[in-house]
Image (cartoon, rainbow, N blue to C red):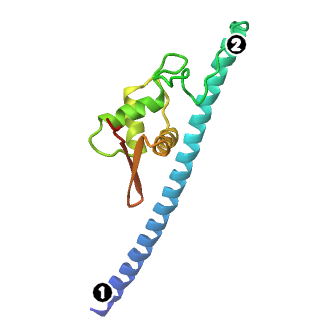
């Protein structure tokens, strides 16, 4: 019986050590995945910027005598319409429409997922959505709700 107890103790100790190493390795890999995800997000953003720059350069080369009007604060004209200069609905307007249609508060990640599914032709990033949501909060057009470490956003309904 003593030998069996020693063997059980040895195996228990070995399993406990293996569990500790497993948990430590999981944490290391989670950190690495988070770092790589952030790096991938950055690269995807840079890719989008570079594609837009490439398109602008190609358009500029083919139509060098055509002038492109500048937009102020990302708004189309003085009225701040719902379309960008290219005729697309702006991301901010898509975000506002989503918040208005949603019954529950939404996280930036949730908004990004829904808009990315609805607008597959657009490259929508969580960081840009989060910044846009925070800008809407700063302008009083959205409300921020904190639940623990999570942040959710709702529409601010205008007064009649």
Where residue 80 appears, as percent x and y from the top left, is 51, 25
Residue matched to label 1: 4
Q: On screen, 11 above or below 160?
A: below
Residue matched to label 2: 60
Task: Describe the element under mark 1 as helix, strand or loop.
Answer: helix
The foreground one among 1 and 148 is: 148
Where residue 36 appears, as percent x and y from the top left, is 55, 48
The foreground one among 158 and 31 is: 158
Where residue 100 appears, as percent x and y from the top left, is 33, 35
Q: On screen, 72 above or below 127?
A: above
Residue sticking out furthest to the front: 160
Q: On screen, 139 above or below 122?
A: below
Task: Describe the element under mark 2 as helix, strand or loop.
Answer: helix
| Nearest to N terminus: mark 2 or mark 1 | 1
* C-alpha gap between disc 2 and disc 1: 82 Å
Please name the residue shown 55% across and 41% down the image.
41
């Amino acid at each position: 019986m003593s030998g069996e107890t020693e063997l059980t103790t040895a195996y228990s100790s070995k399993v406990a050590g293996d569990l500790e190493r497993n948990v430590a390795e999981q944490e290391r890999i989670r950190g690495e995945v988070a770092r790589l995800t952030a790096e991938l997000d950055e690269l995807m953003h840079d890719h989008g910027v570079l594609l837009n720059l490439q398109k602008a350069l190609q358009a500029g080369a083919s139509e060098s005598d055509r002038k492109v009007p500048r937009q102020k604060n990302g708004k189309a004209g003085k009225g701040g319409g719902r379309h960008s200069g290219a005729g697309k609905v702006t991301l901010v307007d898509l975000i506002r429409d989503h918040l208005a249609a949603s019954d529950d508060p939404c996280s930036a990640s949730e908004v990004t997922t829904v808009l990315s599914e609805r607008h597959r032709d657009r490259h929508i990033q969580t960081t840009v959505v989060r910044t846009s949501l925070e800008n809407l909060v700063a302008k009083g057009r959205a409300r921020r709700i904190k639940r623990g470490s999570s942040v959710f956003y709702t529409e601010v309904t205008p007064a009649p």
